[in-house]
Image (cartoon, helix red, strand yellow):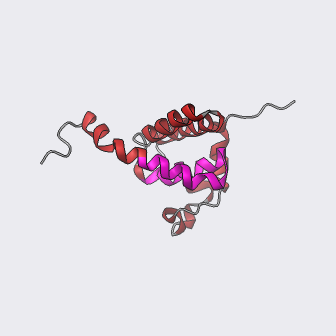
Amino acid sequence: MTREHPCCKTVWPWLRGAPLDDPHWKGNREAHGARVLAPLTGQDSSALAAFVHVIELYARSDARGRVAALRAAAALLFAPQEKTWPLFKEAIAHVLDWSDRAQLWGEIEKLCEASKFETIQQVDPTWGAE
């Protein structure tokens, strides 16, 4: 009996081979394949690993757990560089399905936008004050 590997381990080879259709990657096809992960820092990589586990939680949860998972996914997007977000979006399809990606990403982005100002002000109280 073979043991299934956790999604945080399988996401890396999967992203290297995924048909990345985000506009950020369309004009940057040389980044596809082995180099697609090059922009990720250590912090970005850790956030992505946590993100796929949160998406996995979403997939296994009831309605209450799904709401919590979406909020956690949105919170995690404050850790990586924004330019790496397309990889996070694509990773949704690794855990769920391609058809789920657009809907979930839209919900995650809305939650992220709603909490962006509050989160940034917690780190830098002068942000937004003119």
**Can residue 38 be seen?**
no
Residue 64 in which image quadrant: top right
Q: Is residue 22 above or below residue 79?
A: below
The relative height of residue 27 versus residue 85 in the rendered view (above or below) is: below
Taking the view exactly as shown, the residue that stands out farthest to the right is: 1
Residue that protrudes farthest toward the left in the picture: 130
Residue that protrudes farthest toward the front in the picture = 63
**Left or right of residue 116: residue 2:** right
Q: Quadrant of the N terminus?
A: top right
**Residue 12 horizontal/vertical position (percent):** 63, 45
- The residue lying toward the viewer, choosing from 30 and 105, is 105
Residue range highlighted in magenta: 83-110
Q: Is residue 42 above or below residue 105?
A: above
In this rendering, would 23 be left or right of 97?
A: left
**Residue at (53%, 48%) from the top-left corner?**
88
Task: Tell me if residue 109 is in the magenta stretch.
Answer: yes
Q: Point out residue 125 in the picture as x, y percentages from the top left corner.
A: 20, 36
Please tell me which residue lies in front, 14 or 90: 90
Residue 27 % position (x, y):
51, 69
Q: Quadrant of residue 76?
A: top left
Between 67 and 48, which is closer to the camera in this rendering?
A: 67
Q: Look at the magenta stretch and give its main secondary structure.
A: helix
Which residue is at 66% across, 38% downward?
7
Seen at 68% across and 34% down, the residue is: 6
Residue that lies at the very extreme toward the bottom in this rendered image: 27
Total numbered labels: 0
- Residue 129 seen anywhere in this rendered image of the structure: yes
- Residue occupying the point 12% across, 48% down: 130
Check if residue 121 falls in the magenta segment: no
